[in-house]
Amino acid sequence: MTGSATFEAVREEIAYAFDSTVFFRDHMEANGLRPEDIKDADDFLRIPPTSKSHYRRNFPTGVLAKGYTLNSSHVMRFQSSGTSGDRLNSAILAYDLARRQATAIGVNRRFDDLWRPGSRPKICRYAPPNCSDVECATGFSGMEDRTLPDGTLVLTVAHDLLATPEWQIVKALDEIELYQPDLLVVDPTHFAFLTRWARRLGRRITSPRPLHIVCGYTLMTRAARRQIEDFMGPDVPIGDMIGMSELGYLGFDCHLGHRHINDRDFFVEFVRDGKPVREGQMGELYVTTVDDGLIPRIRYATGDYFTPLGGSCDCGSDLPVVRIEGRGTHMVRLPDGRLVTPGALDAAVGDVPWIDLYKLEQDLTGACTFRYVPGAQAPADDAAALERRLTEILAPAPVRVEAVDYIACERSGKFQSCISHISAKEAAR
């Protein structure tokens, strides 16, 4: 268990959640617990984790704190993309979201000038439709129909990324020029796709304002990062966000390229088989909110896995450094019991300059198919080396490598670089 968020603050959150929310009181009482029973870190582990399913079933009345409704001041409503199943409705207080965002992005000095005193950044979003917060992100709607109450412009996006028609791509590029944003908040796979098209059309993605890019929603592969950085150039700050729709910013890249987890606005644990892991070991991220007046969450199992790396970072931030492994439902399960995470797969694939995007899919027999869309002719030696790396990391599971022109997105509209039907089936049980 780690965190600069003190355990006393956690105890206060437990007491508040118990007194203020129907669900958490029932959760504690069903396990014979009351807030006064949680005196130290060992007692804390007695609280069974909470999950998305709890909040899906009990939203809104069971999880909103007493005195709040969805129409209360400063309440922002969200709906998740449905990556791990049914979409999750949630809400957050605007100032809590802003506080968590400031803490996370604060690790990256290249984003300092984004938050000028007295200014409000103009934001464009280019992400899967299920992440858009507007129902008309895929159609023929105008910019005014896709502008959120906070001023964010949601760019039009096709549900199946590689099937996006050219007119829709041109429309997104035109609207960026018209809106003149300070910040692009994007899915990295989607934005890499947009940069490929912009290059093909002889277009640029610029703004008269200093432009910044925050990536999120899905794993930022090395292939996507390379394409975005090459197209946007070295003067545009690019950061990768760790986040969830129901919690906001959980972490961010520092300016040295290391990912930090936000343990100031959250109390974080990394858990495997019910026990905290040591540094250098992979564990599921459990989050306990700190001072969340609207929907306090205690030991919230996110389904996302990380490896806490320990040590300090030369960037100067004291937020812990982690390595992203990916969602548990996407991990490849090998016959010998080992797991290959999406993060480990991306490290094995590496920054292959002749691949635009890829997807590894494990079927229910355990066999794996690696499909990729080539951006250039692969040198014979490089293609063979990639196949050897994949065969080695996925052994003893059989692997097939295919170059293709098209790879479909998921049902959620996201493009996942690694999926396992075995892991997804086990999670559904």
Image: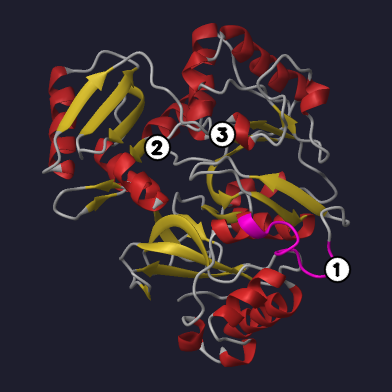
Is residue 187 shown left or right of residue 139?
left
Q: Please name which of the two marks, 3 or 1, marks the residue nearer to the observer.
A: 1
Name the foreground residue: 52 vs 175.
52
User: For the residue marked with disc 3, what is the amino acid?
Assistant: Asp
Dots 3, 1 in contact, CB < 8 A: no
Dots 2, 3 in contact, CB < 8 A: no
Q: What whole-number distance in Å separates the C-alpha atoms at marks 2 and 1?
A: 43 Å
Residue 124: % across, % down: 70, 31
Residue bearing the label numbered 2: 221
User: For the residue marked with disc 1, what is the amino acid?
Assistant: Gly
Q: Can residue 106 be seen in this view?
A: no
Mark closer to the chain start, 2 or 1:
1
Residue 188: % across, % down: 50, 34
- Which quadrant of the view contains residue 367? top left
User: For the residue marked with disc 2, what is the amino acid?
Assistant: Thr
Name the foreground residue: 154 vs 321.
154
Residue bearing the label numbered 3: 235
Magenta region, residue range: 57-68
Relative to 73, say whether 228 is above or below. Answer: above
Residue bearing the label numbered 1: 67
Mark closer to the chain start, 2 or 3:
2
